[in-house]
Amino acid sequence: MSIKPSPLAVLALSLMFVAGSVAAADPKITAEQVKDNIYMLQGGGGNVGLFIGKDGTFLIDDKFAPMSAAILAQIKKLGGDTPKYLLNTHFHGDHTGGNQNFGQQGAIIISHDNVRKRLQQGSYIAAFDMKTPPAQAPALPVITFAQNIHLHLNGDNVSAIHIPSAHTDGDSIIHFKKANVIHTGDTFFNGFYPFIDAANGGTVKGMIAAADTILALANDQTKIIPGHGPLANKADLQSFRDMLATAYKSLSALKSQGLNADQAVQKKPLAALDAQWGKGFMGTDKWIKVVYPAVD
């Protein structure tokens, strides 16, 4: 899938995903072993999940298109092969930009129904004035699901579970049941404020519900791959969930009083969260303006 945003949108995208330029000339991918033959790949774009085994290489998300070669090189370095299965956790370009490349190489792309719909129709992220043109095969998912789908491969039972109205309207979390590993997609940004795409179905309440769903699946030994940020555990996700609940309570109160986003910022309602959460790609004031439409 190609992305042709305006120069302003390119800058916004860089800030939004802490990914650098989409057209990075020298993409770097690093791998961290999560559990056995499950890895987290980091670099420009969202965190990628990688599952290697005799039944084929299973990839969760694929960053931007220019990262595909580096992703494949890292997969082969770890003993895997060209991905046989590719699951998109949602439609944003830093998680689906490599679909075209991997689809051309034969990957079977899987997603929630709404991911295929938004990729096929093209999309617009209002908060960053970023337009993405419609995608065509082989960048489109060929297997879609409405609620859950289960894959049985490489000695594990893997479930993709749809989370409604969270980061977007098409989010999925991926649960490796035997390995006790969960990939959250962008329902979890570890250590900083998350982008919530209100224009495409995202809500703060849905993000809180997503965290609750994952927390119910996790225990103290669970390894959690967030959409962005370092590898996490249940305590990290609980902290994120608590932050969202605090923010929602404060912002919904201001919204119920009829205050707009600029007026809400002036009230400094999240001052107590600044030190821990306001040092990511969006400071607290910016985050309030971006997330305010997602507070219902």
Image (spheres, helix red, strand yellow):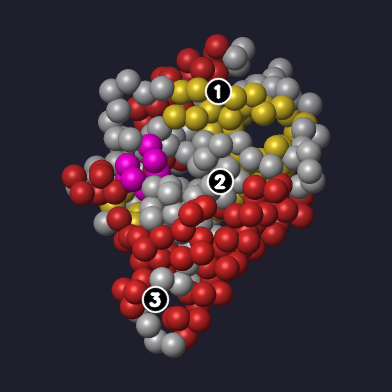
For label 3, the residue is 267
- Would you say 118 lies left or right of 88 here? left
Give the mark nearer the N terminus: 3 vs 2.
2
Between circles 1 and 3, the one closer to the viewer is 3
199 lies above or below 108: below
254 lies above or below 288: below
Whole-percent x, y for residue 206 in the image? 58, 64
Measure the alpha-carbon separation of dots 3 and 2: 26 Å
- The N terminus sits in image quarter: top left
Q: Are marks 2 and 1 in contact (CB under 8 Å)?
A: no
Residue type at mark 1: give it: Ala
User: Which span is picked out in magenta?
Assistant: 13-19
| Dot 1 alpha-carbon crowd within 10 angstroms: few under 14, some 14 to 19, many 20 or more | some
Residue ID at (56%, 46%): 190
Between circles 3 and 2, the one closer to the viewer is 3
Residue 7 colored magenta?
A: no
Residue ID at (70%, 48%): 235
Whole-percent x, y for residue 26 in the image? 32, 20
For label 1, the residue is 31
**Residue 190 got which mark?**
2
